[in-house]
Image (cartoon, rainbow, N blue to C red):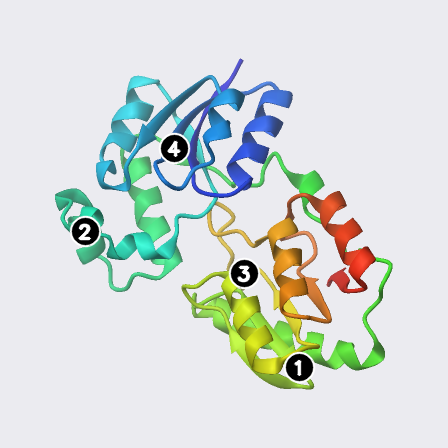
Amino acid sequence: MPRIGLIAGNRKFPLIFAQEAKRKGYSVVAVAIKGETHPGLGRLVEKIYWLDLGEFSRLFEVFSNENITEAVLAGQISPWQLFRPQVKNNPELKSLLNSLRDKRADTIFREIARRLEAKGIKLLDSTFLLSDYMPEQGVLTKQKPAAGNLADINLGLEIAKEIGGLDIGQTVAIKNKAIVAIEALEGTDNLIRRAGRIARAGVIIIKVSKPAQDMRFDVPVVGLNTVKSLLRAKAAGLAIEANKTLFIDKEQSLKLADRKGIFITAV
């Protein structure tokens, strides 16, 4: 049975990866982050090691001791972790962060990938077992975008690709061809809530991959929490990029969207 390492961030992405890996014949050794990773992950993997983010250097030690040569990074680490004293006072993390020209997501993750590979551990495409979770092009809900929504979606795609190319965020909110909000460190759910406060109702959310998306990390993900945020913001709908966005809890999410009359489309 092939063995694979899992660097597990928050939410359900790591759980789904572990489930699919087990179903497809892999044995998973997980490194989980205290305060971030779902506690249920331990039931889905062969072994799990719980580390504080300040124990960053032990990641390499764990995989080396377990003879792991390939690993996946699934799930996010909350951006506010960058500002914790445990991170700023950790010599190795401080050295890593200070060596970077900026602290954008891709910059940080690429350096982690480089250091893993220097230790003989290859970081893989995080979606290589999850093609069933990535919708193809088409409207996913019973509710279809209205004719007037299409102009907002097209504008949103253009703007989202621009900010993605700058590695600022992957999501924008549009209403009546006005750019209501763009995503930065706060994440998609907070962006949606902020857009709802600004635009009141009827905003459209567009989430895409980056133009040069590195599929090893920071892959766009939506799910039930996204739909709940759309409802709280009284949004009209959501457009995601087809074949490049992980849709978690898809069936449950679409049922809720259908019940509330919002559209979700993959474009």
Judging by the rendered image, the residue that carries numbered circle 2 is 85
Secondary structure under tag 3 reads helix
Secondary structure under tag 1 reads strand
Q: Which amino acid does label 3 sit on?
A: Asp
Judging by the rendered image, the residue that carries numbered circle 1 is 175
Are dots 1 and 3 in contact, CB under 8 Å?
no
Residue 69 visible somewhere in the drawing: yes
Distance (Cα) linking label 1 and label 4: 39 Å
Quadrant housing residue 198? bottom right
Q: Which amino acid does label 4 sit on?
A: Ala
Distance (Cα) linking label 2 and label 4: 20 Å
Residue 138 visible somewhere in the drawing: no
Q: Which amino acid does label 1 sit on?
A: Lys
Instruction: From the top left corner, tell me how far across and down residue 69 is, in percent.
Output: 39, 26
Judging by the rendered image, the residue that carries numbered circle 4 is 32
Are dots 3 and 4 in contact, CB under 8 Å?
no
Instruction: From the top left corner, tell me how far across and down residue 238 is, in percent.
Output: 69, 65
- Image-based side of 116 in relation to 152, left or right: left
From the viewer's side, name the closer residue of 48 and 39.
39
Mark 3 or mark 2: whose residue is earlier in sequence: 2
Q: Which amino acid does label 2 sit on?
A: Pro
Query: Neighbour class for label 3 at 10 Å: few (<14), some, many (≥20)?
Result: some
Query: Which is more foreground, mark 3 or mark 4?
Result: 3
